[in-house]
Image (cartoon, grey):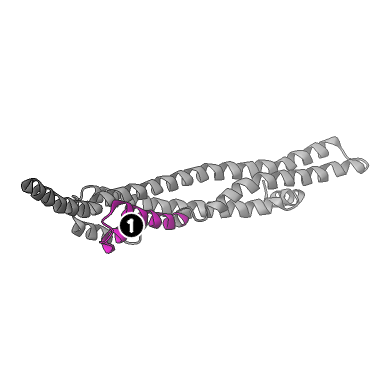
């Protein structure tokens, strides 16, 4: 298969093969960038969650070290809320503030995935369009005198290459799109898990303090009675 032959196929498809080549390059760029980005977040976040899980309740001094190790991970924003808002000793108030941070982080996680979704949807349609254009070019030769049937069937076979190319790009993109969506879902679950662990460790201090205040009052009431 020579370069001239490939250029001829692209021309017979109305130029759609050129567009599909661009779609393939765009899709591969998104796949590589998102896969590497989510991999770094998943691996770094896993270490943060494992470390926080081993921290005793109300030990905010140990959370400070994990905040420094988190760096630019979205997990760091959750740790910031727990460390810089000591007044949030109520579980529900702390939960609402942490959930707000997670909602702000989600658009960063699935950024550019809509581009890959568009490639998956558009590639088969462009392939079908290119095949239709190629079929027109192939059957237009029947109006010319002396056209052999082999030439027509050969043109039809070449036109189908556009459809095959579009389906290949769509199948490749769909596999990676589902994988990236699943990795994004797992990363959000990772953030939700960290949120719950922080609630259990930070809000515990306020709850224990309240219990220490209430119990003496109850003891005095029983003594007085």
Kindly tell me whether residue 106 is visible in this rendering: yes
Residue nearer the viewer, 105 or 47: 105
Kindly give the residue lying farthest to the bottom in the view shown.
Answer: 84
Residue nearer the viewer, 143 or 168: 168
Kindly tell me whether residue 27 is visible in this rendering: no
For this view, does 220 lie left or right of residue 197? left
For this view, does 134 lie left or right of residue 67? right
- Magenta stretch: includes residue 60: no
Kindly give the residue lying farthest to the right in the view shown.
Answer: 145
Q: Secondary structure at mark 1?
A: helix
- Residue 96 x %, y %: 36, 54
Tell me the quarter of the image containing the N terminus: top right
- Residue 34 x %, y %: 47, 53
- Magenta stretch: includes residue 106: yes
For this view, does 77 lie left or right of residue 167? left
Residue nearer the viewer, 109 or 78: 78
Considering the whole magenta stretch, tell me its main secondary structure. helix
- Please determine whether, in this image, residue 155 is positioned above or below residue 21: above
Kindly give the residue lying farthest to the front in the view shown.
Answer: 225
Residue found at x 62% / y 55% = 22
Q: Which residue is mark 1?
A: 78
Tell me the quarter of the image containing the C terminus: top left
Residue found at x 13% / y 48% = 218
- Residue 145 x %, y %: 93, 42
How crowded pointer 1 is (Cα within 10 Å; few <14, some 14-19, many 20+) is rated as many
In magenta, the rendered stretch is: 79-107
Residue nearer the viewer, 148 or 13: 13
């Amino acid at each position: 298969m020579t370069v001239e032959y490939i250029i001829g196929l692209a021309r017979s498809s109305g130029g759609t093969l050129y567009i599909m080549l661009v779609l393939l390059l765009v899709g591969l760029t998104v796949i590589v960038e998102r896969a590497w980005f989510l991999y770094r977040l998943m691996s770094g976040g896993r270490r943060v969650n494992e470390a926080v899980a081993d921290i005793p309740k109300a030990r905010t001094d140990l959370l400070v070290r994990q905040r420094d190790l988190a760096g630019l991970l979205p997990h760091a924003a959750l740790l910031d809320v727990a460390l810089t808002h000591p007044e949030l000793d109520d579980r529900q108030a702390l939960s609402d503030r942490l959930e707000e941070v997670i909602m702000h982080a989600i658009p960063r996680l699935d950024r550019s995935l809509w581009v890959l979704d568009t490639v998956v949807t558009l590639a088969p349609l462009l392939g079908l369009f290119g095949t239709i254009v190629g079929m027109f070019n192939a059957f237009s030769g029947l109006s010319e005198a002396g056209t052999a049937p082999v030439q027509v069937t050969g043109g039809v076979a070449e036109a189908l290459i556009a459809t095959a190319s579009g389906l290949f790009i769509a199948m490749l993109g769909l596999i990676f799109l589902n994988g990236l969506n699943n990795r994004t879902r797992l990363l959000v679950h990772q953030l939700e898990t960290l949120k719950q662990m922080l609630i259990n460790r930070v809000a515990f201090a306020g709850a224990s303090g309240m219990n220490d205040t209430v119990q003496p009052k109850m003891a005095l009431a029983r003594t007085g009675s």
